[in-house]
């Protein structure tokens, strides 16, 4: 599990994330003042995920587990949701890149699959 610490408190961000298999994907993060939440978009090879809400989850990409070779875990210190623009930069909310093996472990440990 690799923590992504490059997330700032900018409203719109674009990061290139490198997986443990040396595959790259584009991650866009957008903060909405009106809805008090973060949204993400991912572009990996020919797969595009647009405008999904960032929520506390062992794997926010669970529905893509058989398609993507990675997952993303979002954790918070206080078990709440990411709702502040500085959540990631303050480390109240943590963003982790999961390997395929870690995605499988999440399925077993959290979802009993």
Image (tube, rainbow, N blue to C red):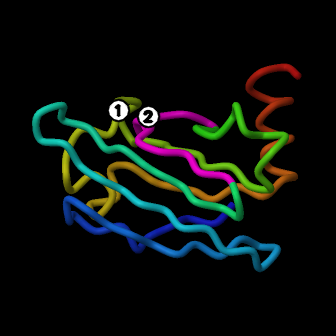
Q: Which quadrant, please, contains the N terminus? A: bottom right
Question: The residue tagged with tag 2: helix, strand or loop?
Answer: loop
- Give the residue pinned by disc 2: 55
Percent of width and height locating residue 99: 78, 58
Say if the magenta span includes residue 49.
yes
Question: The residue tagged with tag 1: helix, strand or loop?
Answer: loop
Farthest residue, direction bottom: 22
Which residue corresponds to the image point at 36% horizontal and 67% vertical from the top-left? Answer: 7
Q: Is residue 18 above or below residue 104?
A: below
Q: CA distance from mark 1 to mark 2?
A: 6 Å
Splitting the image into 4 quarters, where does residue 45 fall?
A: bottom right
Which residue corresponds to the image point at 52% horizontal and 75% vertical from the top-left? Answer: 16
Q: How many marks?
A: 2
Which residue corresponds to the image point at 41% horizontal and 60% vertical from the top-left? Answer: 28
Farthest residue, direction front: 46
Q: Are marks 1 and 2 in contact (CB under 8 Å)?
A: yes
Farthest residue, direction top: 112
Q: Is residue 104 above or below residue 47?
A: above
- Give the residue pinned by disc 1: 81
Say if the magenta span includes residue 100.
no
Q: Nearer the viewer, residue 39 or 96?
A: 39
Splitting the image into 4 quarters, where does residue 90 fall?
A: bottom left
In the rendered structure, the answer to whether residue 8 lies left or right of residue 64 reads left
Q: Nearer the viewer, residue 79 or 29?
A: 29
Q: Is residue 89 above or below residue 68?
A: below
Q: Which mark is residue 64?
A: none
Percent of width and height locating residue 88: 33, 57
Magenta residues? 47-58
Splitting the image into 4 quarters, where does residue 64 fall?
A: top right
């Amino acid at each position: 599990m690799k923590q992504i610490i490059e997330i700032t408190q900018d409203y719109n961000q674009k990061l290139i994330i490198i997986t443990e298999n040396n595959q790259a994907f584009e991650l866009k993060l957008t903060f909405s003042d009106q809805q008090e939440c973060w949204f993400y978009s991912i572009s990996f090879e020919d797969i595009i995920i647009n405008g999904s809400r960032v929520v506390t989850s062992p794997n926010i990409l669970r529905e893509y587990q058989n398609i993507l070779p990675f997952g993303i875990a979002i954790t918070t210190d206080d078990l709440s949701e990411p709702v502040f623009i500085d959540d990631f930069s303050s480390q109240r909310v943590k963003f982790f890149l999961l390997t395929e093996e870690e995605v499988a472990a999440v399925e077993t440990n959290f979802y009993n699959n």
